[in-house]
Image (tube, rainbow, N blue to C red):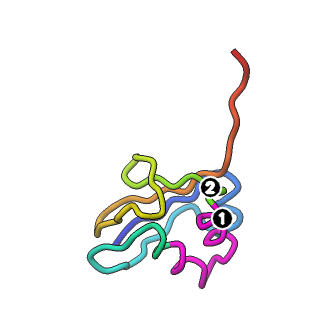
Amino acid sequence: MITLKYFASLRTIAGKEEEQLDVGSETTVQQLSETLSKTAPQIGEMIQKKRIMVSVNQDVADLTTVIHDGDEVAFLPPFSGGSL
């Protein structure tokens, strides 16, 4: 079981802040995006097109990152910083 956390506008798109998902012993971010596309197609597409940042256990992840049972996956929308 992994924990998915949605931040900012992604909470509205997903319709929740957090959920638990059983993905077996391990999966990749790519495979997770395909799974999410079935229930939240917009989020699945955003992951595929790298329009949102994905972190696994608070480390930035890419589509090939392996997710293990018990991991926490967070989805963060694009953001920009201020000026110096």
Would residue 10 appear left or right of 70 to someone viewing this image?
right
Which residue is more in the foreground, 19 or 51?
51
1 or 2: tag closer to the N-terminus = 1
Magenta span? 33-49
Residue holding disc 1 = 46
At 26% from the left edge and 76% from the top edge, which residue is drawn? 25
| Label 2 element class | loop
Residue 27 position in % (x across, y down): 36, 73
Residue holding disc 2 = 52
At 29% from the left edge and 69% from the top edge, which residue is drawn? 69
Give residue 14's quadrant in the image.
bottom right
How far is the residue under mark 1 from the one under mark 2? 6 Å
At 61% from the left edge and 72% from the top edge, which residue is drawn? 44
Q: Counting other residues with Cα less than 10 Å from the Cα at mark 2, is it few (<14), some (14-19), or many (20 or more)? A: some
Q: Is residue 41 magenta?
A: yes
Mark 1 vs 2: CB contact within 8 A: yes
Quadrant in which the C terminus appears: top right
Q: Is residue 81 above or below residue 76?
A: above
Q: Could you tell me how many numbered marks the image carries?
A: 2
Residue 4 position in % (x across, y down): 47, 64
Q: Is residue 23 visible?
A: yes
Q: Amino acid at mark 2?
A: Ile
Q: Amino acid at mark 1?
A: Met
